[in-house]
Image: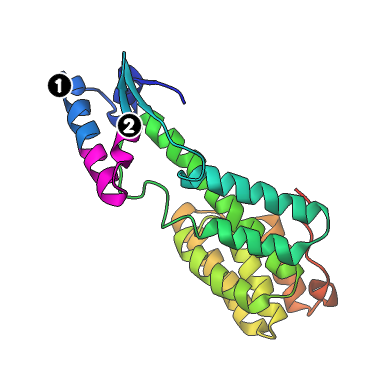
Amino acid sequence: MQTVTLDRLSRSVWPEAPLSAAANLRTYAYTLRMRLDRALPGLGGALETVRGGYRLSVEGGRLDLHDFESVTQEAEGLVARGRLACAADRYEQALRLWRGKPLDDVSGGPLLLTETAWLEERFTGAIERAVDLWLAIGQNGKVVEVASRVVHDYPFHERFWEQLMLGLFRSGRQVEALEAYARARLWLIEAAGVEPGPAMRRLQRAILANDPTLFGPTLSALPA
């Protein structure tokens, strides 16, 4: 448990804190306690007012992020022992703890944006890892299902496009795999003025050539 000072909270919430920052934070803390109590009676008391700031006291098993970290660590242990199917199941369990993008409906100052970026990196990293595992154990239908969704949420994340292309190709959908590359390339050019990276270009050429090595084990990211 760590106390978060009023100064840090102010810099997290506002790019430039207003004169009423302390009063506003008290109001926000009260509102947060009410919402926590509605979610689980008595949980509002976990947000404590302490000298100079606030502290959130949460027992083990009551914070999604802690559970997520625990489950993904367990999954990596399974990967190290070669139990890829079990590891994929654990990653799927971990991903169910997330409901949308982290803090998607919250705006704030630079400190909060840094935390949001870190959370998003953990989230996208877990998705990427799970999809790599599904590719490795031949669950190509699940790869296509998940990758088709996440490329819309994270169109600049080229690895997701590569996973979608490979899942489609391994499912006997070569034309759709090449169409996915074309969509990714068009997006990158129009949105950022760049071509796809070398890895995606190599994959596109391999799909065009029906390269049989694309059906081999996909362990490029295993173990971590």
Going from N to C along the chain, the mark reached first, 2 or 1, is 1
What amino acid type is highlighted by mark number 2?
Leu
Q: Residue at left 51%, top 64%?
A: 151
Residue 142: give x, y in percent of width and height: 61, 74
In front here: 153 or 66? Answer: 66
Give the extent of the magenta segment: 31-47
In this picture, residue 130 sits left or right of residue 7: right
Magenta stretch prevailing secondary structure: helix
Residue 42 in sight here: yes
Q: Tell me, what colour scheme is on the image?
A: rainbow
Identify the residue under disc 1: 20
Provide the residue designation for mark 2. 47
Q: Is residue 153 above or below residue 215?
A: above
Quarter of the view holding residue 46: top left
Q: Label 2 vs label 1: CA separation?
A: 21 Å
Residue 6 picture location, percent across and down = 30, 19
Residue at x 78%, y 65% (from the top left corner): 218
Choose between 29 and 120: the one closer to the eye: 29
